[in-house]
Amino acid sequence: MAQFNYLMVLGFIGACAIFVNIGFRLRISSKWKLFLLTDAVILTIYLAWDFWAVSKGSWYFDSEQVIGLYIFSRLPIEEILFFIIVPLMVVLTYLALIKLSRPASKAKK
């Protein structure tokens, strides 16, 4: 069961992202293109760093806590998913906070 630890955390974060999107009616689907373009930059930078760090032995992934599917023979699929799901949750949280702050700023005027 330990091999699913990382995936379970990502699943929880992904579920939170879905609930935030629905609960705050953020309509993230209208912004997919922008998110994917931005996330492609994040993926490129951080996965290159991860690959380099793993290759040098400075970083590693516990083989008992990942499912064993590796990309580029070094990076577990969970790491790629991390750099997609977590930035999505950050964007959704940001949009939700903006939405929450609008009524308060209108009331002050």
Image (cartoon, rainbow, N blue to C red):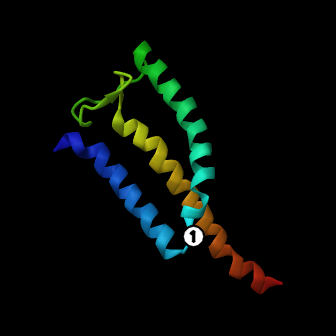
Q: Which residue lies furthest to the top in this view?
A: 56
Q: Considering depth in this image, is 72 or 94 the residue closer to the camera?
A: 72
Depth check, front residue: 109 or 4: 4
Regarding residue 61, the answer to whether it shows in the image is no
Q: Which residue is drawn at 58% across and 68% down?
A: 96
Query: Which one is nearer the viewer's eye here, 39 or 106?
Result: 39
Q: Looking at the image, which residue is at 45% across and 22% down? A: 51
Give the side of residue 61 with respect to residue 92, left or right.
left
Q: Name the residue under label 1.
A: 26
| Quadrant assignment for the C terminus | bottom right
Measured from the top left, where is residue 82 in percent x and y?
A: 43, 43
- Tell me the crowding category of disc 1: few under 14, some 14 to 19, or many 20 or more residues within 10 angstroms, Cα based: some
What SS does tag 1 mark?
A: loop
Give the quarter of the figure containing the N terminus.
Answer: top left
Q: Which residue is drawn at 54% across and 62% down?
A: 29
Q: Where is residue 16 in the image (x, y as percent from the top left)?
A: 42, 63
Kind of residue at badge 1? Leu
Q: Where 23 sits versus 81, above or below?
A: below
Is 108 rendered above or below residue 57?
below
Residue 30 is situated, as x and y percent measured from the top left of the image, at 59, 63
